[in-house]
């Protein structure tokens, strides 16, 4: 039985990945910082994963967790993930996102150098690029978050040159009902649950025209696993190849409400629910991000199953259910 250690197991990707690896018969270990309140997404598998305490900023805790798990595969998914926070706490962002991987790689190299390492790299590493982003597209990050991810990505590359199997999965935005509530997609679907319940508060957003390549997290964790099964290790771009604006996302959310609540939202327009707040505009805003996932398609045989409208639908459904407006029967598109 293969052993996997996941940092960030309590997060969106960590929880979907843990479910997927259990399906593949892995013994799964996960690093968590604390118990209560953060385990919501692990409820269904809590008795089948072994949780170990640790923090990416604390070498000793990582070392102890690594010894206990003694992993064949290490997935480094933990991180300070929110771009605006990275402007508030740049040093902490670098310490967690870059320093964390540096601590893990040192442990791997010294203790068990055949452990295969997956690093959660990000499309935010590219910054503003015209057209599609590929594995060899130049990185021009525009935030401390992007910089921390580029540095970690390069660190993985340099350990690869030293013989460690380390890959950077350059994942474009991927969402789900488990997405952090501070992220724009989740902000919109949570607000929609409020509108359905009769709340008339308008959602303030900074930029409706920003475009992202949005996929479903449950699909993306399969690419992470596939990357660690290749005969030679290399980086891969993972995305859908399509980009959509925040306005398009919000418009589809409204269409979902229209469909579910006949009559109530028939004449509703986006501006009835959303208002622009220039104070929410980001420094270094990235306008459009679009993946070219050709390498992942051809070499990993990876293709997303959930398209953009289906992703919106499942997120709206889940937030309606979480607010007691829908029964959760038709909800969970897990990682199956
Ligand atoms: P998430 O849901 O916010 O999960 C982040 C996880 O990191 C949480 O489990 C969190 O634990 C943990 N964590 C944060 N700081 C930590 C620390 N100092 N030590 C140990 N654990 C810590 O994020 P996600 O969406 O699953 O993203 C997973 C990874 O993929 C991240 O590295 C992210 O930067 C990267 N990524 C995500 C996307 C995306 O669109 N989702 C795209 C590209 C790359 P707590 O519960 O204790 O806070």
Image (cartoon, rainbow, N blue to C red):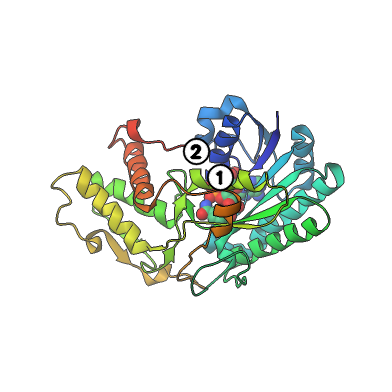
Query: Which disc number belongs to residue 295?
Result: none
> Residue 263 versus residue 198: which sits nearer the camera?
263
Q: Position of residue 98 (x, y in %)?
A: 70, 58
Quadrant housing the N terminus: top right
Q: In the image, what residue occupies the spot 36% across and 38% down?
A: 322
Crowd rating for badge 2 (residues with CA inside 10 Å; few <14, some 14–19, many 20+): some
Q: Answer left or right for 182 relative to 162.
A: left
Q: In the image as oriented, which residue stretches furthest toward the front?
A: 298
Crowd rating for badge 1 (residues with CA inside 10 Å; few <14, some 14–19, many 20+): many
**Residue 198, visible in the rendered structure:** no
Dot 2 or dot 1: first in sequence order is 1
Q: In the image, what residue occupies the spot 52% across and 37% down?
A: 37
Q: Answer left or right for 112 relative to 208.
A: right
Q: Are marks 2 and 1 in contact (CB under 8 Å)?
A: yes
Q: Position of residue 242 (x, y in %)?
A: 43, 61
Give the SS element for disc 1: helix
> Residue 7 versus residue 61: which sits nearer the camera?
7
Q: Identify the residue position indicated by label 1 in the image.
A: 221
Q: Identify the residue position indicated by label 2 in the image.
A: 335
């Amino acid at each position: 039985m293969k052993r996997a250690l996941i940092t960030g197991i309590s997060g969106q990707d960590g929880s979907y990945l843990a479910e997927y690896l259990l399906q593949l018969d892995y013994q799964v270990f996960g690093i968590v910082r604390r118990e209560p309140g953060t385990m919501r997404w692990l409820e269904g598998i809590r008795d089948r994963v072994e949780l170990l305490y640790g923090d990416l900023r604390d070498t000793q805790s990582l070392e102890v967790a690594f010894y206990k798990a003694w992993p064949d595969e290490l997935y480094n998914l933990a991180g300070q993930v929110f771009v605006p926070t990275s402007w508030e706490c740049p040093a902490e962002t670098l310490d967690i996102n870059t320093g964390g991987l540096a601590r893990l790689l040192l442990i791997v190299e010294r203790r068990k150098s055949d452990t295969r390492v997956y690093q959660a790299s990000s499309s935010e590493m590219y910054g503003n690029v015209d057209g599609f982003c590929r594995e060899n597209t130049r990185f021009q990050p525009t935030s401390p978050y992007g910089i921390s991810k580029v540095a970690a990505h390069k660190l993985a590359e340099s350990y690869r040159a030293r013989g460690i199997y380390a890959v950077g999965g350059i994942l474009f935005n991927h969402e789900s009902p488990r997405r952090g509530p501070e992220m724009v997609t989740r902000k919109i679907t949570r607000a929609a649950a409020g509108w359905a319940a009769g709340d008339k508060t308008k959602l303030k957003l900074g930029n409706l025209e920003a475009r992202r390549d949005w996929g479903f997290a449950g699909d993306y964790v399969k690419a992470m696993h596939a990357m660690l099964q290749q005969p030679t290790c290399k980086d891969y771009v993972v995305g859908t190849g399509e980009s959509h604006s925040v306005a398009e996302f919000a418009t589809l959310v409204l269409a979902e409400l229209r469909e579910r609540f006949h009559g109530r939202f028939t004449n509703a327009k986006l501006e009835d629910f959303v208002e622009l707040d220039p104070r929410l505009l980001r420094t270094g805003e990235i306008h459009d991000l679009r993946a070219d996932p050709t390498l992942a398609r051809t070499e990993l045989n990876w293709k997303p199953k959930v398209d953009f409208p289906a992703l919106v639908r499942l997120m709206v459904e889940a937030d309606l259910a979480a607010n007691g407006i829908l029964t959760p029967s038709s909800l969970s598109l897990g990682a199956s």
